Amino acid sequence: MTKYHVIYPGSTIGEWSIGRAFQFAVLVIGLVASMQLASAQSRREFHRVFEVSLAEPVILDLELSRASLEIAYGREGQVSITASTNNENSKALNEDPFSNRLIVAMNGNHLEVHDGPDVLAGADSNVAYRIDVPYRTEVRSFVQRGSETINGVAGPVEVRTQDGNIMVSYVSQQVSARTESGNIDVQVIGGRVEARANRGDISCVRAPQGVDVETNDGDISLAVVGPSRAAVPRGNGGIKAGGIWGSFTASTAAGELYVRAVPHSDWQLSSASGGVRIELPPEAKFEIDASTSSGEFMVKRNDLDAPEKQSHHFTWKVNGGGAHIQVHTDSGMISIG
């Protein structure tokens, strides 16, 4: 026979705690509901749709002073722009931003989007914009302060920001990304990638046509890319690369340069005061030419004889030779494994 116990809050210390816990849970649920309602009341969105031709690609030109911008594939035959904000003090909550904060000029399939008179006059412009576009869309975008995210278009894509992060993914053609201060993240790009950051990290995953990336103060991370160049000419930033399918040129000033891949083509790797670490599979065929001005060598392979302790240069063929790997440091260690 199943026994049921009825708990009366206050009957014992344990039972009182359970009762109070139930009351507290009800209170939390009420508070969460109130917060969601308040958020919904303070958030306001404005929406506008522009019809475009299916016969030609869309060209989207944007220049905004401050915004959070997202451009993504939506549907064919139209460009849809949504403006929203969670700032209850923002002027955008009380009036349509398309009339005074955002100007959209359309000529056929060419749309130009830029700040309206209120923003140019110094009004608060903390607004998020989402633009849904057809797949065949070319993007040229500049946001002075704010993040930019672009996903699922044919391209080409040219995106810039003065102060903010950039993320570009699933673009069929080439991508160019530049920021003065911010991180750049690029993933699954059909064309060649060019990325520049004065202060910020750069990462790129799956770009078979290769990349050309450089940052003056940050780290670079590459995975599964074609013929590429990567450089950190100043600062302590390092470079990490794996799955390099083609030639590779990489250099750092003081950070570590680490490459783990099969050498399908020639590599040129260098660092001033940082170390260079290379990991190659046992069956890899390559020729290595390694030199250092005042650094040391560390060899972790059975098919390579370690150079003499005072040596500053050595060359070797592995598995009959193949791709040429040239490595140099001024004072950093060279490690080969």
Image (cartoon, grey):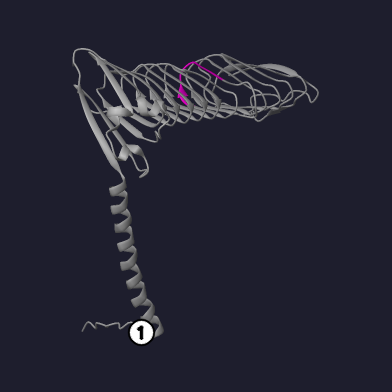
Crowdedness near tag 1: few (<14), some (14–19) or many (≥20) residues, C-alpha within 10 Å: few
Q: Residue visible at 38% across and 86% down?
A: 12
Q: Residue furthest bottom?
A: 11
For the stretch drawn in magenta, the main secondary structure is strand
Q: Is residue 261 magenta?
A: no
Residue 75 visible within the image: no
Figure label count: 1
In terms of secondary structure, where does tag 1 sit? loop
Residue 62 horizontal side relative to residue 199, left or right: left
Q: Which residue is mark 1?
A: 10
229 over 24 or under it: above or below: above
Which residue is at the front of the view, 52 or 222? 52
Res. 259 image quadrant: top right
Q: Name the spot of residue 205 as percent of width and height, x first.
A: 44, 27
**Residue 73: percent from left, percent from top:** 27, 27
**Residue type pointed to by label 1:** Gly
Q: Which residues are magenta?
A: 223-230
Q: Is the residue 210 above or below the residue 75 in the image?
A: above
